[in-house]
Image (tube, helix red, strand yellow):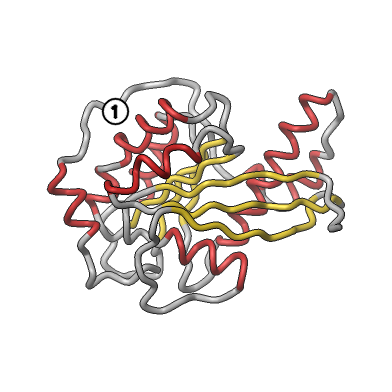
Amino acid sequence: MEDYKFLFKIVLVGNAGVGKTCLVRRFTQGLFPPGQGATIGVDFMIKTVEVEGEKIKLQIWDTAGQERFRSITQSYYRSAHALILVYDISCQPTFDCLPDWLREIQEYANSKVLKILVGNKTDRDDREIPTQIGEEFAKQHDMYFLETSAKEAENVERLFYEIAAELIDQARSKDGTNVNKTTADAIGLGNFGTKATQNSCCSGFSSNTSQTNCENGNSRSNT
């Protein structure tokens, strides 16, 4: 039996085509699958990592972005320790859909779940959402923020290792155990993102047309 200190469940959500599966496969398998098809329902992979001298098992759930799978994927929110909300920096409608995804998270997930906003596909040269806009949205909704590229492996390992470090911090705090902050900061946790001190609601929800445009964006790579 594999020996590990903590087991954490991480769930990725977001529109179809934003690169959720590619992020998971880049981290767990070290590869970028060209021409990756849409996820059907829910898939998951497991990877054991070492953080702060402890073996941590990450159970990473990759959910489908299409509307027809929502009733299935929503059931995975409740037991999640961390939720990664992904959008495509080169596809404005995937960003416009974020308030709708947050509404689902608020309805179905634990109120104390760790939330991370990820802008994926930074390797593309047709960016539509500036970094600052993503940062501001994350701050408004008390989320961490990071931009990644599954294709170029940019910030992918950092994303999951820092999530693991933050979850260890939370777990030890519950147990009254002091966390080695020096080690946590060494892997970049201090720069992971700034949580907002205010909570403001986003007024706009994306239209069904916008969401469909992203789901049907076959010409875009799942970077």
x, y percentage for residue 110?
54, 27
| Residue that appears at 56% across and 61% down | 156
Question: Up-down: is 121 above or below 55?
Answer: below
Front-lying residue, 179 or 33: 33
Left or right, 195 with reference to 183: left
Crowd around label 1: few <14 · some 14–19 · many ≥20 (10 Å)? some
x, y percentage for residue 9?
62, 45
Question: Up-down: is 182 above or below 46?
Answer: above
- The residue where tag 1 is placed is 202
Left or right, 49 with reference to 93: right
Left or right, 105 with reference to 193: left
Say what amino acid the circle numbered 1 marks: Cys
| Residue that appears at 36% across and 40% down | 71
Where on the picture, by quarter, is residue 126?
A: bottom left
x, y percentage for residue 197?
50, 22
| Residue that appears at 42% across and 38% down | 74
